[in-house]
Image (cartoon, rainbow, N blue to C red):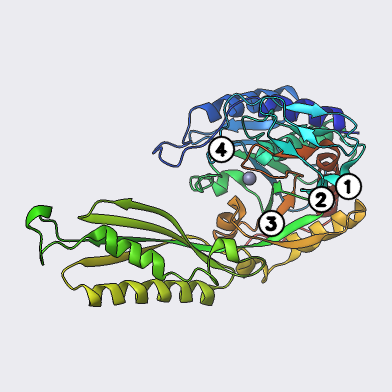
Amino acid sequence: MWNEKLEERLVRYCAIATPSDSASPTAPSTACQWDLLRLLEQELRDMGASEVELGEFGHLMATVPGNCDGPVIAWMAHVDTSPQFNGLGVKPLVHRNYQGQDLVLPDDTSQVISPSEFPYLKGKVGHDIVTASGISLLGADDKAGVAIVMTLAEHLLKNPQIPRAKTRLCFTPDEEVGRGVKHLDFAKLGAKYAYTLDGGDVGELCYETFSADKAVITVTGVSIHPGYAKDKLVNALHLACQIVEMLPKVIRTPETTEGRQGFIHASSLQGTSSEAVIQLILRDFELEGLKSHHELIESICHSIQLAEPRAQVKVEFTEQYRNMRYWLDKEMSPVHMASEAFRKANIEPNLTVLRGGTDGSWLTEKGLLTPNLFAGMQNFHGPLEWVSIQDMAQAVGVCVELVQLWARQPVAPAG
Ligand SMILES: [Zn+2]
Protein backbone atom coordinates (compact mmCIF):
# COMPACT_ATOMS: atom_id res chain seq x y z
CA MET A 1 0.00 0.00 0.00
CA TRP A 2 2.99 2.30 0.52
CA ASN A 3 5.11 1.22 -2.46
CA GLU A 4 4.34 4.13 -4.76
CA LYS A 5 4.95 6.77 -2.11
CA LEU A 6 8.15 5.10 -0.95
CA GLU A 7 9.56 4.82 -4.44
CA GLU A 8 8.68 8.38 -5.35
CA ARG A 9 10.29 9.67 -2.16
CA LEU A 10 13.39 7.50 -2.30
CA VAL A 11 14.18 8.44 -5.91
CA ARG A 12 13.66 12.13 -5.23
CA TYR A 13 15.74 12.15 -2.01
CA CYS A 14 18.61 10.08 -3.47
CA ALA A 15 18.99 12.51 -6.38
CA ILE A 16 19.82 15.28 -3.88
CA ALA A 17 23.53 15.10 -3.08
CA THR A 18 24.19 15.10 0.68
CA PRO A 19 27.65 13.64 1.42
CA SER A 20 29.00 14.62 4.84
CA ASP A 21 32.64 15.60 5.39
CA SER A 22 34.66 14.63 8.45
CA ALA A 23 37.25 17.34 7.79
CA SER A 24 34.72 20.16 7.94
CA PRO A 25 34.39 22.03 11.25
CA THR A 26 30.78 23.15 10.66
CA ALA A 27 27.52 21.53 11.81
CA PRO A 28 26.14 20.17 9.55
CA SER A 29 29.51 19.37 7.99
CA THR A 30 28.31 20.20 4.46
CA ALA A 31 25.87 22.89 3.29
CA CYS A 32 24.25 20.51 0.78
CA GLN A 33 22.55 18.64 3.63
CA TRP A 34 20.35 21.72 4.16
CA ASP A 35 18.89 21.14 0.66
CA LEU A 36 17.27 17.88 1.72
CA LEU A 37 16.47 19.09 5.25
CA ARG A 38 14.59 22.13 3.88
CA LEU A 39 12.73 19.99 1.37
CA LEU A 40 11.66 17.60 4.15
CA GLU A 41 10.65 20.56 6.32
CA GLN A 42 8.30 21.81 3.59
CA GLU A 43 6.97 18.32 2.94
CA LEU A 44 6.17 17.84 6.65
CA ARG A 45 4.29 21.16 6.74
CA ASP A 46 2.39 20.22 3.58
CA MET A 47 1.30 16.89 5.02
CA GLY A 48 -0.01 18.62 8.15
CA ALA A 49 2.61 17.68 10.76
CA SER A 50 2.80 20.06 13.70
CA GLU A 51 5.75 21.60 15.59
CA VAL A 52 7.87 21.43 12.43
CA GLU A 53 11.22 22.96 13.30
CA LEU A 54 14.60 22.96 11.59
CA GLY A 55 17.28 23.82 14.13
CA GLU A 56 20.57 25.66 13.66
CA PHE A 57 22.63 22.45 13.65
CA GLY A 58 20.46 20.74 11.04
CA HIS A 59 18.11 18.73 13.23
CA LEU A 60 14.65 18.64 11.70
CA MET A 61 11.91 17.74 14.20
CA ALA A 62 8.15 17.44 13.81
CA THR A 63 5.16 15.98 15.61
CA VAL A 64 2.26 13.76 14.71
CA PRO A 65 -0.20 14.61 17.50
CA GLY A 66 -1.41 11.73 19.65
CA ASN A 67 -4.98 10.52 20.14
CA CYS A 68 -4.25 8.47 23.25
CA ASP A 69 -1.74 8.20 26.06
CA GLY A 70 1.53 6.37 25.87
CA PRO A 71 5.21 7.23 25.94
CA VAL A 72 6.46 9.63 23.26
CA ILE A 73 8.46 7.72 20.65
CA ALA A 74 10.87 9.42 18.24
CA TRP A 75 11.44 8.02 14.74
CA MET A 76 14.84 8.93 13.36
CA ALA A 77 16.82 8.76 10.12
CA HIS A 78 19.92 10.55 8.84
CA VAL A 79 19.97 12.70 5.70
CA ASP A 80 23.71 12.56 4.93
CA THR A 81 25.42 9.94 2.78
CA SER A 82 28.83 8.37 3.24
CA PRO A 83 31.87 10.34 2.06
CA GLN A 84 33.64 7.00 1.40
CA PHE A 85 32.44 6.87 -2.23
CA ASN A 86 31.22 9.46 -4.75
CA GLY A 87 27.82 10.74 -3.67
CA LEU A 88 27.43 13.45 -6.32
CA GLY A 89 25.33 13.15 -9.47
CA VAL A 90 23.31 10.21 -8.15
CA LYS A 91 20.90 8.87 -10.79
CA PRO A 92 18.51 6.48 -9.05
CA LEU A 93 17.22 3.72 -11.35
CA VAL A 94 14.11 1.64 -10.68
CA HIS A 95 14.29 -1.97 -11.89
CA ARG A 96 10.61 -2.76 -11.76
CA ASN A 97 9.36 -6.30 -11.17
CA TYR A 98 12.84 -7.76 -10.84
CA GLN A 99 13.22 -11.19 -12.47
CA GLY A 100 16.40 -12.58 -10.91
CA GLN A 101 18.87 -11.30 -13.51
CA ASP A 102 22.21 -9.55 -13.03
CA LEU A 103 21.69 -5.81 -12.69
CA VAL A 104 24.26 -4.11 -14.96
CA LEU A 105 24.67 -0.45 -14.08
CA PRO A 106 24.54 1.64 -17.29
CA ASP A 107 27.08 4.41 -16.55
CA ASP A 108 29.82 1.86 -15.76
CA THR A 109 28.89 -1.56 -17.09
CA SER A 110 31.70 -3.20 -15.08
CA GLN A 111 29.50 -2.54 -12.05
CA VAL A 112 27.15 -5.51 -11.79
CA ILE A 113 24.85 -6.48 -8.93
CA SER A 114 24.54 -10.22 -9.25
CA PRO A 115 22.30 -12.53 -7.21
CA SER A 116 25.10 -15.13 -7.26
CA GLU A 117 27.36 -12.70 -5.44
CA PHE A 118 24.67 -11.17 -3.24
CA PRO A 119 22.28 -14.00 -2.28
CA TYR A 120 19.83 -11.66 -0.54
CA LEU A 121 18.88 -10.37 -4.00
CA LYS A 122 17.70 -13.87 -4.98
CA GLY A 123 14.73 -13.54 -2.66
CA LYS A 124 13.59 -10.31 -4.31
CA VAL A 125 12.06 -11.63 -7.52
CA GLY A 126 8.95 -9.58 -8.27
CA HIS A 127 10.22 -6.62 -6.24
CA ASP A 128 11.02 -3.14 -7.47
CA ILE A 129 14.76 -2.67 -6.96
CA VAL A 130 16.39 0.75 -6.85
CA THR A 131 20.09 1.15 -7.71
CA ALA A 132 22.41 3.99 -8.70
CA SER A 133 23.83 4.19 -12.23
CA GLY A 134 27.35 2.84 -11.62
CA ILE A 135 29.36 5.99 -10.88
CA SER A 136 28.03 6.90 -7.45
CA LEU A 137 26.56 5.34 -4.36
CA LEU A 138 22.75 5.36 -4.15
CA GLY A 139 22.34 6.81 -0.68
CA ALA A 140 19.61 4.40 0.45
CA ASP A 141 21.76 4.65 3.59
CA ASP A 142 19.88 6.41 4.93
CA LYS A 143 17.39 7.92 2.49
CA ALA A 144 15.49 4.64 2.64
CA GLY A 145 15.11 5.38 6.36
CA VAL A 146 14.09 8.99 5.63
CA ALA A 147 11.46 7.83 3.12
CA ILE A 148 10.15 5.24 5.60
CA VAL A 149 9.76 7.79 8.43
CA MET A 150 8.10 10.33 6.10
CA THR A 151 5.69 7.67 4.82
CA LEU A 152 4.92 6.56 8.37
CA ALA A 153 4.15 10.17 9.35
CA GLU A 154 1.88 10.69 6.34
CA HIS A 155 0.06 7.41 7.01
CA LEU A 156 -0.63 8.37 10.64
CA LEU A 157 -1.77 11.87 9.68
CA LYS A 158 -4.14 10.53 7.02
CA ASN A 159 -5.57 7.85 9.30
CA PRO A 160 -6.51 9.57 12.54
CA GLN A 161 -8.37 6.46 13.70
CA ILE A 162 -5.05 4.61 14.24
CA PRO A 163 -4.25 4.76 17.97
CA ARG A 164 -1.00 6.61 18.60
CA ALA A 165 0.57 8.53 21.44
CA LYS A 166 2.29 11.80 20.56
CA THR A 167 4.80 10.78 17.91
CA ARG A 168 8.02 12.67 17.17
CA LEU A 169 9.99 12.64 13.93
CA CYS A 170 13.64 13.60 13.83
CA PHE A 171 15.96 13.87 10.82
CA THR A 172 19.64 14.36 11.53
CA PRO A 173 22.80 15.24 9.57
CA ASP A 174 26.34 13.85 9.73
CA GLU A 175 25.71 10.30 10.97
CA GLU A 176 28.36 8.98 8.59
CA VAL A 177 31.04 11.16 10.18
CA GLY A 178 29.93 10.18 13.67
CA ARG A 179 28.65 13.48 14.99
CA GLY A 180 25.07 13.82 13.78
CA VAL A 181 23.44 13.83 17.19
CA LYS A 182 26.18 15.49 19.23
CA HIS A 183 24.24 18.79 19.28
CA LEU A 184 20.81 17.21 19.57
CA ASP A 185 18.50 18.97 22.02
CA PHE A 186 17.05 16.04 24.00
CA ALA A 187 14.61 18.26 25.89
CA LYS A 188 13.23 19.65 22.65
CA LEU A 189 12.90 16.18 21.15
CA GLY A 190 11.03 15.15 24.30
CA ALA A 191 10.98 11.43 23.57
CA LYS A 192 10.97 8.55 26.03
CA TYR A 193 12.45 6.12 23.48
CA ALA A 194 13.63 6.38 19.89
CA TYR A 195 14.22 4.12 16.91
CA THR A 196 16.60 4.72 14.03
CA LEU A 197 15.58 3.33 10.63
CA ASP A 198 19.11 2.66 9.43
CA GLY A 199 19.53 -1.10 8.98
CA GLY A 200 19.70 -3.71 6.21
CA ASP A 201 17.80 -6.98 5.72
CA VAL A 202 14.11 -7.35 6.53
CA GLY A 203 13.84 -8.51 10.14
CA GLU A 204 17.01 -6.86 11.38
CA LEU A 205 16.57 -5.53 14.90
CA CYS A 206 19.78 -4.28 16.40
CA TYR A 207 20.44 -3.36 19.99
CA GLU A 208 24.14 -4.15 20.03
CA THR A 209 26.85 -2.08 18.38
CA PHE A 210 30.60 -2.00 18.75
CA SER A 211 32.29 -0.08 21.51
CA ALA A 212 34.77 2.14 19.75
CA ASP A 213 37.90 4.11 20.55
CA LYS A 214 40.58 5.58 18.38
CA ALA A 215 44.31 5.78 18.97
CA VAL A 216 46.83 8.20 17.52
CA ILE A 217 50.50 7.24 17.78
CA THR A 218 53.01 10.01 17.17
CA VAL A 219 56.62 9.02 16.54
CA THR A 220 59.18 11.81 16.68
CA GLY A 221 62.62 10.96 15.32
CA VAL A 222 65.88 12.92 15.24
CA SER A 223 66.31 14.99 12.09
CA ILE A 224 69.80 15.57 10.65
CA HIS A 225 71.11 16.31 7.15
CA PRO A 226 71.28 12.81 5.64
CA GLY A 227 74.83 13.40 4.38
CA TYR A 228 76.06 13.85 7.95
CA ALA A 229 73.63 11.57 9.70
CA LYS A 230 75.78 8.60 10.70
CA ASP A 231 74.87 7.50 14.23
CA LYS A 232 72.71 10.59 14.70
CA LEU A 233 69.57 10.41 12.53
CA VAL A 234 66.59 8.53 13.90
CA ASN A 235 64.03 7.96 11.16
CA ALA A 236 60.44 8.23 12.39
CA LEU A 237 59.11 6.46 9.29
CA HIS A 238 61.11 3.30 9.97
CA LEU A 239 59.88 3.21 13.56
CA ALA A 240 56.28 3.84 12.55
CA CYS A 241 56.43 0.99 10.05
CA GLN A 242 57.79 -1.31 12.74
CA ILE A 243 54.85 -0.42 14.97
CA VAL A 244 52.35 -1.23 12.20
CA GLU A 245 54.24 -4.48 11.49
CA MET A 246 53.97 -5.53 15.12
CA LEU A 247 50.16 -5.25 15.21
CA PRO A 248 48.77 -8.79 15.03
CA LYS A 249 47.59 -9.36 11.50
CA VAL A 250 45.94 -12.71 11.91
CA ILE A 251 43.70 -12.41 14.93
CA ARG A 252 42.81 -8.76 15.25
CA THR A 253 42.33 -7.00 11.91
CA PRO A 254 38.96 -6.20 10.29
CA GLU A 255 39.79 -8.50 7.37
CA THR A 256 40.33 -11.51 9.65
CA THR A 257 37.44 -11.04 12.08
CA GLU A 258 33.64 -11.34 12.00
CA GLY A 259 30.62 -11.83 14.23
CA ARG A 260 31.45 -10.88 17.79
CA GLN A 261 35.21 -10.58 17.34
CA GLY A 262 36.83 -7.20 17.81
CA PHE A 263 39.75 -5.68 15.93
CA ILE A 264 42.45 -3.04 15.64
CA HIS A 265 42.51 -1.31 12.27
CA ALA A 266 45.44 0.84 11.13
CA SER A 267 43.54 3.43 9.09
CA SER A 268 46.24 5.97 8.26
CA LEU A 269 50.03 6.40 8.29
CA GLN A 270 51.43 9.79 7.42
CA GLY A 271 54.69 11.53 8.03
CA THR A 272 58.27 12.36 7.27
CA SER A 273 61.58 11.02 8.56
CA SER A 274 61.33 13.45 11.46
CA GLU A 275 57.72 12.78 12.52
CA ALA A 276 55.16 10.12 11.66
CA VAL A 277 51.55 9.73 12.80
CA ILE A 278 49.64 6.44 12.83
CA GLN A 279 45.86 6.48 13.22
CA LEU A 280 44.15 3.37 14.51
CA ILE A 281 40.56 2.47 15.28
CA LEU A 282 39.80 -0.03 18.04
CA ARG A 283 36.57 -1.99 18.08
CA ASP A 284 35.08 -4.60 20.40
CA PHE A 285 31.66 -5.56 21.75
CA GLU A 286 33.03 -5.86 25.30
CA LEU A 287 34.91 -3.25 27.32
CA GLU A 288 37.46 -5.88 28.42
CA GLY A 289 38.21 -6.59 24.77
CA LEU A 290 38.66 -2.90 24.08
CA LYS A 291 40.98 -2.69 27.08
CA SER A 292 43.13 -5.51 25.74
CA HIS A 293 43.45 -3.61 22.43
CA HIS A 294 44.67 -0.59 24.40
CA GLU A 295 47.20 -2.72 26.28
CA LEU A 296 48.53 -4.29 23.13
CA ILE A 297 49.09 -0.91 21.47
CA GLU A 298 50.73 0.47 24.60
CA SER A 299 53.07 -2.49 24.89
CA ILE A 300 54.13 -2.22 21.23
CA CYS A 301 54.83 1.50 21.63
CA HIS A 302 56.74 0.81 24.83
CA SER A 303 58.98 -1.80 23.22
CA ILE A 304 59.81 0.51 20.28
CA GLN A 305 60.57 3.32 22.74
CA LEU A 306 62.90 1.03 24.73
CA ALA A 307 64.71 -0.10 21.60
CA GLU A 308 65.26 3.49 20.42
CA PRO A 309 65.43 5.87 23.40
CA ARG A 310 66.42 8.86 21.20
CA ALA A 311 62.99 8.79 19.57
CA GLN A 312 59.73 9.79 21.21
CA VAL A 313 56.76 7.49 20.90
CA LYS A 314 53.46 8.84 22.21
CA VAL A 315 50.04 7.28 22.08
CA GLU A 316 46.74 8.99 22.75
CA PHE A 317 43.39 7.21 23.02
CA THR A 318 40.01 8.88 22.44
CA GLU A 319 36.63 7.36 23.28
CA GLN A 320 34.26 7.28 20.29
CA TYR A 321 31.06 5.41 21.24
CA ARG A 322 29.86 2.50 23.37
CA ASN A 323 27.82 -0.63 22.76
CA MET A 324 24.16 0.32 23.33
CA ARG A 325 23.53 -3.10 24.89
CA TYR A 326 25.16 -1.96 28.18
CA TRP A 327 22.11 0.29 28.74
CA LEU A 328 19.41 -1.62 26.86
CA ASP A 329 20.18 -4.76 28.88
CA LYS A 330 18.76 -2.93 31.88
CA GLU A 331 15.63 -1.82 30.06
CA MET A 332 14.69 -4.06 27.18
CA SER A 333 11.15 -2.78 26.58
CA PRO A 334 12.02 -0.88 23.34
CA VAL A 335 13.54 -4.10 21.97
CA HIS A 336 10.74 -6.36 23.18
CA MET A 337 8.08 -4.03 21.80
CA ALA A 338 9.86 -3.94 18.45
CA SER A 339 10.04 -7.76 18.38
CA GLU A 340 6.31 -7.93 19.01
CA ALA A 341 5.63 -5.42 16.23
CA PHE A 342 7.76 -7.47 13.82
CA ARG A 343 5.69 -10.57 14.61
CA LYS A 344 2.42 -8.66 14.18
CA ALA A 345 3.73 -7.68 10.74
CA ASN A 346 4.55 -11.37 10.05
CA ILE A 347 8.29 -10.79 10.15
CA GLU A 348 10.56 -12.93 12.30
CA PRO A 349 12.81 -10.56 14.28
CA ASN A 350 16.50 -11.17 13.73
CA LEU A 351 18.44 -9.73 16.66
CA THR A 352 21.74 -8.88 15.00
CA VAL A 353 24.92 -7.33 16.29
CA LEU A 354 26.11 -4.37 14.28
CA ARG A 355 29.84 -4.29 13.50
CA GLY A 356 29.79 -0.52 13.60
CA GLY A 357 27.97 2.23 15.43
CA THR A 358 24.75 4.10 14.87
CA ASP A 359 23.49 7.44 16.10
CA GLY A 360 21.63 5.24 18.57
CA SER A 361 24.89 4.15 20.22
CA TRP A 362 25.52 7.67 21.36
CA LEU A 363 21.87 8.53 22.08
CA THR A 364 21.49 5.40 24.20
CA GLU A 365 24.61 6.20 26.20
CA LYS A 366 23.19 9.69 26.86
CA GLY A 367 19.92 8.22 28.14
CA LEU A 368 17.64 7.97 25.09
CA LEU A 369 17.38 4.24 24.39
CA THR A 370 17.48 3.90 20.59
CA PRO A 371 17.58 0.47 18.92
CA ASN A 372 18.01 0.30 15.14
CA LEU A 373 15.45 -1.20 12.75
CA PHE A 374 15.88 -2.46 9.18
CA ALA A 375 15.33 -0.10 6.28
CA GLY A 376 16.27 -2.56 3.52
CA MET A 377 19.55 -1.00 2.33
CA GLN A 378 22.19 -3.33 0.82
CA ASN A 379 25.87 -2.90 -0.20
CA PHE A 380 25.83 0.62 1.19
CA HIS A 381 28.78 3.06 0.89
CA GLY A 382 29.60 1.85 -2.63
CA PRO A 383 28.43 1.78 -6.27
CA LEU A 384 26.59 -1.54 -5.89
CA GLU A 385 24.19 -0.17 -3.30
CA TRP A 386 20.56 -1.21 -3.79
CA VAL A 387 17.27 -1.41 -1.94
CA SER A 388 13.91 -3.11 -2.51
CA ILE A 389 10.83 -0.89 -2.30
CA GLN A 390 8.86 -3.86 -0.95
CA ASP A 391 11.41 -4.29 1.88
CA MET A 392 10.97 -0.62 2.74
CA ALA A 393 7.19 -1.09 2.77
CA GLN A 394 7.63 -3.90 5.29
CA ALA A 395 9.56 -1.48 7.49
CA VAL A 396 6.67 1.01 7.34
CA GLY A 397 4.36 -1.85 8.32
CA VAL A 398 6.50 -2.64 11.37
CA CYS A 399 6.55 1.04 12.41
CA VAL A 400 2.75 1.32 12.14
CA GLU A 401 2.38 -1.76 14.37
CA LEU A 402 4.94 -0.43 16.82
CA VAL A 403 3.22 2.95 17.10
CA GLN A 404 -0.01 1.15 18.05
CA LEU A 405 1.69 -1.15 20.57
CA TRP A 406 3.23 1.81 22.38
CA ALA A 407 -0.10 3.67 22.34
CA ARG A 408 -1.50 1.06 24.68
CA GLN A 409 1.34 1.35 27.20
CA PRO A 410 0.89 3.28 30.43
CA VAL A 411 3.09 6.36 30.78
CA ALA A 412 5.38 6.18 33.80
CA PRO A 413 4.53 8.99 36.22
CA ALA A 414 6.97 11.89 36.10
CA GLY A 415 9.72 11.99 38.72
ZN1 LIG B 1 23.31 4.88 7.92
- Is residue 225 among the parts visible in the rendering? no
- Report the image quarter containing ligand 1: top right
Identify residue for label 4: 85
The C terminus sits in image quarter:
bottom right
Exactly how many numbered labels are in the figure?
4
Identify residue for label 2: 119
Which residue is nearer to you in this view: 76 or 351?
A: 351
Q: Which of labels 4 and 3 is toward the front?
A: 4
Q: x and y percent of residue 147 in the render?
A: 73, 34
Identify residue for label 3: 371
Q: CA distance from mark 4 to mark 3?
A: 27 Å
Residue 387 falls left or right of residue 359: right
Q: Amino acid at mark 2?
A: Pro
Q: Are marks 2 and 1 in contact (CB under 8 Å)?
A: yes
| Residue appearing at x 57%, y 73% in the figure | 286
Q: In terms of image quadrants, where is residue 207?
A: bottom right
Q: Which of labels 3 and 2 is toward the front?
A: 2
Q: Earlier in the sequence, mark 3 or mark 2?
A: 2
Q: Earlier in the sequence, mark 4 or mark 1?
A: 4
Q: Amino acid at mark 4?
A: Phe
Q: CA distance from mark 3 to mark 2?
A: 26 Å
Q: Earlier in the sequence, mark 4 or mark 3?
A: 4
